[in-house]
Amino acid sequence: MDVEDFQYPPDRSAAYTIVEISMFEGRSMETKKDLIQQLYKQIHEKLLLPVHDLEITIFETPRAHWGIRGLPGDELELNYSVEV
């Protein structure tokens, strides 16, 4: 399948991109909004992708719904701090 075969909304260009982020739940609304704003800024500056061609979605799930290093996420001890 060629790039020309992909469909995108009529008000977007062929550069239309969706970024999906999966993360543990618990971060503040302010933190998530800041992440989205920083992603728009950095992606636009570094990749020259127009902001109208970018959509960002955050999916939050409980740590117990993750499997990491052979353990459920809520049983995993991280060797770093996660500030939410």
Image (spheres, rainbow, N blue to C red):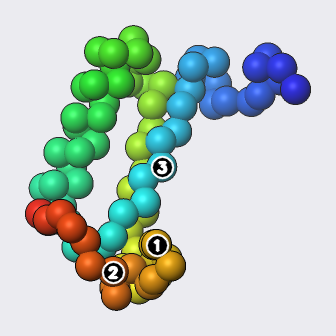
Identify the disc placed on residue 40. Answer: none
Q: Amino acid at mark 3?
A: Glu
- What is the tally of numbered marks visible in this picture? 3
Q: Helix, strand or loop at disc 3? A: strand
Q: Is residue 35 above or below residue 12?
A: below
Instruction: Examine the rendering and report whether any part of residue 41 can be seen.
Output: yes
Q: Nearer the viewer, mark 3 or mark 1?
A: 1
- Name the front one of labels 3 and 2: 2
- Earlier in the chain: of badge 1 and badge 2, it is 1
Q: Is residue 52 left or right of residue 44?
A: right
- Mark positioned earlier in the residue sequence (3 or 2): 3
Residue at x 45% of width, y 31% of height: 54
Of residue 11 and residue 36, the one placed in the foreground of this image is 36
Which corner quadrant holds the N terminus? top right
What residue is shown with label 1? 69
Residue designated by label 2: 76
10 displayed left or right of 47:
right
Relative to 70, does residue 39 appear above or below in the rendering? Answer: above
Q: Position of residue 19 (x, y in %)?
A: 47, 42
Q: CA distance from mark 3 to mark 1?
A: 22 Å
- The residue carrying mark 3 is 20
Viewer-closest of 65 and 28? 65
Disc 1 crowd rating (10 Å Cα; few below 14, some 14-19, many 20+) is few
x, y (%) of residue 10?
64, 24
Check the image and report above or below for 77 versus 8: below
Identify the element where label 2 is drawn: loop
**Front residue (pair 52, 38):** 38
Visible in this render: residue 62?
no
Query: Disc 3 and disc 2: Cα gap in Å?
Result: 23 Å
Spot the residue most to the top. Answer: 48
Q: Are marks 1 and 2 in contact (CB under 8 Å)?
A: yes
Identified at 36% across, 63% down, the residue is 23
